[in-house]
Image (cartoon, grey):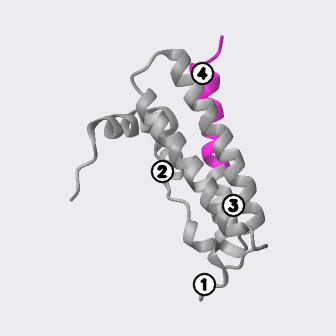
């Protein structure tokens, strides 16, 4: 079994404590960037020709904010809160892209997971970042 880097493992533990296991699972679930490439045997269709690029961009933004969350795990409160808010913005953007570009179960599943994670992050921000 591959070992996770220590900062990532610590961030995952903190997220599990703050968000609960379900929120962390939804947060860490990889986005199906290959699902938006067009019709597949699973019946996943994209809404427009721009969707594969939009989904890939959303996934990159999502990955970047996850990396910044990991880096901010031991930072000061202001930096952590900024990383939390940037991640919520990336989640919201990804939610809109997936809602538009995916169809069927893939859309419903991804949108639900993103909405769950967004709600959990809003709760964490309210507790951690309240002035």
Circle 4 is placed at which residue position? 127
Circle 1 is placed at which residue position? 42
Q: CA distance from mark 1 to mark 3?
A: 20 Å
Name the quadrant containing residue 121. top right
Q: Are marks 1 and 2 in contact (CB under 8 Å)?
A: no
Name the quadrant containing residue 96. bottom right
Pointer 4 or 2: first along the chain: 2
For label 3, count other residues whose C-alpha is less than 10 Å away and answer few (under 14), some (14-19) or many (20+): some
Q: CA distance from mark 4 to mark 2?
A: 21 Å
The percent coordinates of residue 102 (x first, y second) are 71, 70
Q: Which residues are magenta?
A: 115-131
SS at badge 2: helix
For label 4, count other residues whose C-alpha is less than 10 Å away and answer few (under 14), some (14-19) or many (20+): few
Which secondary structure dominates the residues rendered in magenta? helix
Pointer 2 or 3: first along the chain: 2
Pointer 1 or 2: first along the chain: 2
Nearer mark to the viewer, of 4 and 1:
1
The percent coordinates of residue 60 (x first, y second) are 56, 52
Name the quadrant containing residue 104. bottom right
SS at badge 4: helix
Q: Residue at x 57, y 23 (%)?
A: 81
Instruction: Say left or right for 1 vs 109.
Output: left
Circle 3 is placed at which residue position? 54
């Amino acid at each position: 079994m591959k070992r996770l880097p220590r900062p990532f493992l610590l961030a995952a533990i903190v997220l599990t404590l703050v968000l609960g296991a379900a929120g962390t699972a939804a947060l860490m679930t990889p986005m199906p960037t290959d699902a938006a490439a067009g019709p597949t045997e699973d019946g996943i269709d994209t809404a427009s020709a721009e969707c594969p690029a939009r989904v890939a961009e959303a996934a990159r933004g999502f990955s970047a904010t996850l990396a910044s969350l990991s880096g901010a795990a031991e930072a000061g409160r202001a930096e952590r809160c900024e990383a939390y808010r940037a991640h919520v913005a990336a989640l919201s953007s990804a939610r809109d892209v997936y809602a538009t570009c995916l169809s069927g179960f893939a859309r419903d599943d991804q949108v639900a997971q993103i909405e769950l994670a967004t709600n959990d992050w809003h709760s964490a921000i309210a507790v951690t970042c309240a002035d």
